[in-house]
């Protein structure tokens, strides 16, 4: 099997904690190029992951002159995902683009069509699709454990926005000009999970959005109601300025409910007094492995461009409703 040669564009937090460790677990894959506009980020990344042989590039344009790259990970701020993905595909590279795939669904469609025209794989790093919780609950719902799916709730709150808590100093996360915001950052994951776990399409959204953290110009708090094609409903409560860090999901149906609380899964059968904990095995798969396997024609993609576009359609409806105060339709393709 020929070695697959990878370039990393953007050597910040997600490149270091997800993409590079993910590729390092893949057989016959080598990271040959590191690109960032901040040279110290490249040096620190190369040292941390023992990538002394990888060539450093100070811009994507410079890196495009290289002739030893097969595929790239795009790990830059949100507003660069669309132009960089199009340029990389046209350069003849397969692309693993981080979420949010783009700002709107027209851009997503352009990315999908460009990948097809260029004969390249386009994969979106919906990393939460590669955790064991969602897969276990999806299986339980398919087995009929909750009966007819009727309602979901999800709460995701942190005490600080990501430029303080996740990647200190990464101010672009809270700047509209870089397409930051809680919706593009977190709702993009949760909307995708709310749709694939019960395997039911979300068709409409209403949201109340606000900005509470001083000096920023993007949504950092919102509450939303979503409606599914089968008239099931969901609520979302998201915050970057909460008094505590919480992550909870509940899927309710005619015969029971399944929840994620304190990073455990619980199942409550209709009428039972107490929920019982459900054990599940760790899921060793990751987005980078799926991307590499798809390039080698070995496995179907769990999160291709089409999945990224569905998530952006939900985000766009949430944003539109926050602005108009009316329900917004989720665009379908
Ligand atoms: N999939 C996930 O679970 C997940 C989690 C967090 C972040 N993300 C996404 O990953 C992306 C990066 O987030 P992060 O937390 O690593 O941010 P970060 O700010 O830590 O890293 C971004 C890096 O890109 C570099 N950069 C900026 N402009 C560039 C350019 N023109 N060319 C090359 N490099 C450039 C910056 O110098 C920085 O090192 C974002 O789109 C974010 O939404 C995904």
Image (tube, grey):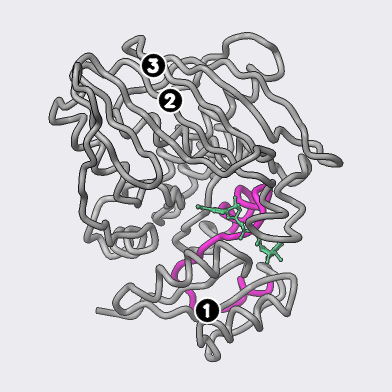
- Residue 331: image location, x then y, percent: 49, 21
Q: Quadrant of the N terminus?
A: bottom left
Callout 3 environment at 10 Å: few (<14), some (14 to 19), or many (20+)?
many
Image height of 284 relative to 195, above or below: below
Q: Which residue is mark 2?
A: 153
Range drawn in magenta: 62-87
Image height of 137 relative to 33, above or below: above
Q: CA distance from mark 1 to mark 3?
A: 47 Å
Side (left or right) of 85 relative to 304: right
**Image-quarter location of ligand 1:** bottom right
Q: Which residue is mark 3?
A: 228
Comparing labels 2 and 1, the label whose residue is closer to the camera? 2
Cβ(mark 1) to ligand 1 < 8 Å? no
Q: CA distance from mark 2 to mark 1?
A: 48 Å
Instruction: Give the camera-side residue of 151 and 57.
Output: 151
For marks 2 and 1 on the same chain, the one whose residue lies earlier in the sequence: 1
Q: Secondary structure at mark 3?
A: strand
Q: Quadrant of residue 232?
A: top left
For marks 3 and 2 on the same chain, the one whose residue lies earlier in the sequence: 2
For marks 1 and 3 on the same chain, the one whose residue lies earlier in the sequence: 1
């Amino acid at each position: 099997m020929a070695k697959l040669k990878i370039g990393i564009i953007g050597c910040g937090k997600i490149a270091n904690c997800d993409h590079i460790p993910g590729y390092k677990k893949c057989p016959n894959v080598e990271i040959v190029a590191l690109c960032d506009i901040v040279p110290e980020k490249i040096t620190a990344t190369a040292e941390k992951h023992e990538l002394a042989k990888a060539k450093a590039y100070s811009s994507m344009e410079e890196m495009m002159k290289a002739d030893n790259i097969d595929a790239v990970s795009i790990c830059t701020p949100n507003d660069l995902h669309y132009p960089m993905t199009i340029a990389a595909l046209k350069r003849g590279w397969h692309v693993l683009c981080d979420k949010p795939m783009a700002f709107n669904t027209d851009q997503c469609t352009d990315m999908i069509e460009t990948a097809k025209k260029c004969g390249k794989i386009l994969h979106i790093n919906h990393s939460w699709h590669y955790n064991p919780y969602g897969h276990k609950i999806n299986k339980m719902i398919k087995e009929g454990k909750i009966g007819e799916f009727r309602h979901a709730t999800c709460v995701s709150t942190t005490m600080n926005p990501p430029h303080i808590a996740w990647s200190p100093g990464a101010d672009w996360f809270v700047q509209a000009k870089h397409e930051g915001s809680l919706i593009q950052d977190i709702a993009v994951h949760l909307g995708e999970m709310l749709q694939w776990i019960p395997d039911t399409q979300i068709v409409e959204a209403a949201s109340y959005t606000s900005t509470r953290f001083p000096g920023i110009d993007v949504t950092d708090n919102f509450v939303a109601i979503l409606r599914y094609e089968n008239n099931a409903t969901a609520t979302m409560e998201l915050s970057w300025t909460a008094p505590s860090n919480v992550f909870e999901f509940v899927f309710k149906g005619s015969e029971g409910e399944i929840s994620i609380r304190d990073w455990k899964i619980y199942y409550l059968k209709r009428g039972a007094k107490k929920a019982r904990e459900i054990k599940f095995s760790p899921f060793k798969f990751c987005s980078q492995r799926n991307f590499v396997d798809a390039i080698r024609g070995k496995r179907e993609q769990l999160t291709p461009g089409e999945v990224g576009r569905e998530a952006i359609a939900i985000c766009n409806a949430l944003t539109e409703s926050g602005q108009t105060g009316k329900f917004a339709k989720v665009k379908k393709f």
